[in-house]
Amino acid sequence: MLLIKQFISRYAARTAAVVAAAVALTSCGSVFDDLEPCPSGVTMRFVYDYNLESAQAFHKQVDCLTLHLYNADGKYVTTVTETSGKLADEGWRMTLDLAPGTYHAIAYGGLACDKASFAHAALPAEGADYRSIAMCLKDDHIGRRLHDHFHGALDFTVSASATDYRQVTMSMTKTTNHFRILLHNLSRQPVDGKDFEFIITDDNTRLDHNNRPVRGHKVSYPAWDSGKVLLSESGNVPVGKAAAAAAEDTDPSLAFGELSTSRLTRNSGARLIIKKKDDGREVLNIPLNQILLASMSSADPWGEQEYLDRGSRWNLTFFLDEGDNWLRTEVIVNGWAVRIRDIDF
């Protein structure tokens, strides 16, 4: 009986050794050249929650994606793009097969689309340094509703001992801003945005690799739409020609102008200018960023530049008297009343 037990024990030990050897031969750590190597690289998640709601909105707002990869020396390696419906899937990840090493990635949302408002100053090429990359706002898009543009940057490492893809996250910032300007005549006289010229001036049509405006590229952004909003219309929606004709002349209205700009930065000197078209008279000429920053709540946990970056969509209401002169009392920014007596114009 003892001999039988010893035989079984020796047989089990030999079986375990054979199984272990088989696992070693089939593992990706094997030295045998005819075996497939381990997966090496990253699966990259893209997040856009850098907004006032702090809500993940990448899959809802980014419709095309461009990713530039650079090596440890900052030299260009490759570009990967994605323009399919995969971007609308919150669970989608970009899989990158990469050799071990350190990488710098720069991502752009909205760049690879047919309707993109930005373009490379020069396409990255072999040997190019990532610090040379720059985005330029297309000249023929100034005065149009800009296609949403996003930027992100990330450093990451692929380990030589990795046996699977590493998970990393790329955070994105929206570069474009959209403005809806409303003029409310407190005398209840009807006003129409088509009687006004809406302009935002800034110096931000060229952006460097860190998404910072490169000075020396001043621009005037005109409105891409204007008209009037009847106060009797629910939701403050611009009325169509038929509705406007049916409305009574005494129905008070707001004038509106819609504008789009590139990235706002705190000390850029951006200004909002509104003029009467008939005589060129300035209704207002104000420092735009100061007005926007004055709408920050004491509860907001962000600094001033972060607040501007998170905003991206702005609604401003100004009050006029019977002569269409701006009443310098307060401005409503995204629903917040801003007292302007402490702002230097």
Image: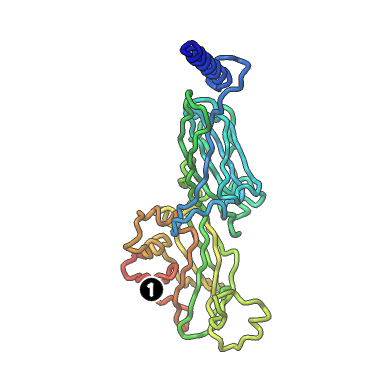
User: From this viewpoint, is residue 73 visible?
Assistant: no
Residue at disc 1, secondary structure: strand
Q: Residue furthest front?
A: 1
Give the x, y percent position of residue 29.
53, 20
User: Could you tell me residue 138's position as x and y percent?
Assistant: 60, 50
* Left or right side of 227 for 48: left
Up the image or down, 253 lies above or below 165; here it is below
Q: Is residue 122 above or below residue 234?
A: above
Q: How many marks?
A: 1
- Amino acid at circle 1: Glu
Residue for point 58% across, 56% down: 146
* Label 1 environment density (alpha carbons within 10 Å; few <14, some 14–19, many ≥20): some
Residue drawn at x 48%, y 71% is: 282
Question: Is 91 above or below relative to 42?
Answer: below
Residue 41 seen anywhere in this rendered image of the structure: yes
List the single residue furthest toward the top.
3
Which quadrant does the C terminus fall into?
bottom left
Residue 101 drawn above or below residue 174: above
Where is residue 297 shown, x and y percent of the image?
Answer: 35, 64
Which residue is denoted by mark 1 in the rendering? 330
Near-viewer residue (324 or 78): 78
Q: Residue at x 43, y 68 (%)?
A: 333
Tell which of 183 and 97 is nearer to you: 97
Is residue 113 rendered to the left or right of residue 189? right
Q: Nearer the viewer, residue 171 or 15?
A: 15
